[in-house]
Amino acid sequence: MTTGRVEYPQQINALTSLRYLAAGWVLLFHLKEFTRFEGLIQNPFVMHGYLGVDFFFVLSGFVLAHVYKRDVDAARFNYWGFISKRLGRIYPMHLFTLGLFIILGVVSLAQGLTYDLWDPAEAFRNLDRGQLIRALVAHITLIHAWGSTPGLQFNLPSWSISAEWFAYLMFPVFLLILRAIRGGPGLKLALAAGLFLAMAVGTQVAMGLELTEMSWNIGILRITPEFFLGVALYNFGQHRTVGRRGAILGLWLSVVAIVASLAASAWVPGAAIVGIPLVVFGLSGVVFFAADGDRYGAFPPLSQPFFVLLGEVSYSVYMLHQAVMVVLFGMLLPGFRPADPALAVAVVAGGLILTTALSWLTYKFIELPGRSIIVGAARKLNQPAVSPAE
């Protein structure tokens, strides 16, 4: 490992491309429920696809540190500009999918439609009017993963966006804490990893719940140590590099560690309490070594424009996939749950391809315009007032 300050490229394309793989992993976890193929449902890699969210949390801390840490260190960080850009990044698709699920829920309720999975009218059926209004307010204000709701409602994956919003708001605090820790980047990274491990074991012992299973039930506890771990990883990478060969080897070893930990967690009784945190450490390794390798062009496929574009639309893929599945398998093909392996694989592949195609449209016509509107409005609000005399 080489010491000394080694610059990352301005755009770390490998990390952008990997976002799509993480989103696809989450989709695989959800799409398996629309089949009856046990070989797919019981596969350790598939059944732990929800951990793609934890990859996003670590990645988010790493990337935001890459973009903004220098500004914070140089005391030129513009918090208003930062937070308006982050809101512009996440809010248009969140608001769009929230509205979409309200429409789907009302239509389902009016038509008497029933679902065996992901009922869009569940909130309307199970919550009284006051609870429903509180749930809507929580979603609109992005606090529905802060312990403010009694469960998941509307677009279920959006809980993680609420958690991300919390991390964005706290981002300068994470950097200040990192700066306050006396010691080198290795010690800071070790302490960040220790915090994650302590919280993972602590929630399991105190609540009987894996940290990586927390969502609406205070999902901000899940993102906090993982986001901070991502920030500490970036800080470490500013001063250390393993070189091209080391990055390639490190990435593959991280993948091996992930697969081994997933297998142990699925097949060895009681192993999950250690195995799942090891998976998160493996995912963190993927983030670090992919970014490190991008310094040397170690992963050319991940820098190809097509894969970078897939990474760009991955947020829409993640936010839109539940609505696509509700319409496709709840309304158009109710009860279609193939047990045949070929048909089951076709369901998964078809669901991913359809969601990706539709997500390109929402990326182009919802995400990008919405982002421009929010950032532009925030910039105008932040302009100093000019008196008539001037």
Image (cartoon, helix red, strand yellow):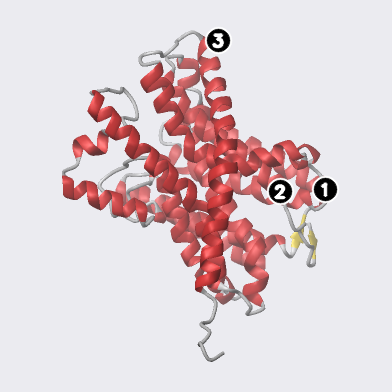
Above or below, 61 against 318 in this view is: below
Amino acid identity at mark 3: Ala
In this figure, which residue is indicated by the disc labeled 1? 244
Mark 3 closeness class: few <14, some 14–19, many ≥20 residues within 10 Å? few
The reply to whether residue 193 is in sight is: no
Q: Give how far across and how far down residue 206 sits, in percent.
A: 31, 52
Q: Which residue is mark 2?
A: 289
Does the rendering let one see residue 262? Answer: yes
Separation (CA) of disc 1 from disc 2: 9 Å
In the image: residue 100, left or right of residue 122: right
Q: Residues within 10 Å of mark 1 (few under 14, many from 20)?
A: some
For residue 98, the mark is none
Asked which quadrant contains residue 8, the reply is bottom right
Among the two numbered marks 3 and 2 on one chain, the one whose residue lies closer to the N terminus: 2
Measured from the top left, where is residue 248 in percent x and y?
Answer: 77, 42
* Residue contact between numbered discs 3 and 1, judged by CB atoms under 8 Å: no
Residue in view at x 47 percent, y 66 percent: 170
Name the quarter where the N terminus is drawn: bottom right
Q: Where's residue 91, x and y in %?
A: 47, 52
> Which three-letter amino acid code belongs to the residue tagged 2?
Phe
Q: Amino acid at mark 1?
A: Arg
CB within 8 Å, label 1 to label 2: no
Q: Which residue is mark 3?
A: 342
Q: Earlier in the sequence, mark 1 or mark 2?
A: 1
Quarter holding the C terminus? bottom right
3D distance between C-alphas at marks 3 and 1: 39 Å
Q: Whole-percent x and y of residue 9?
A: 77, 57
What distance separates the C-alpha of mark 3 from that of mark 2? Answer: 35 Å
From the viewer's perspective, is residue 249 above or below residue 69? above
Circle 1: element type: helix
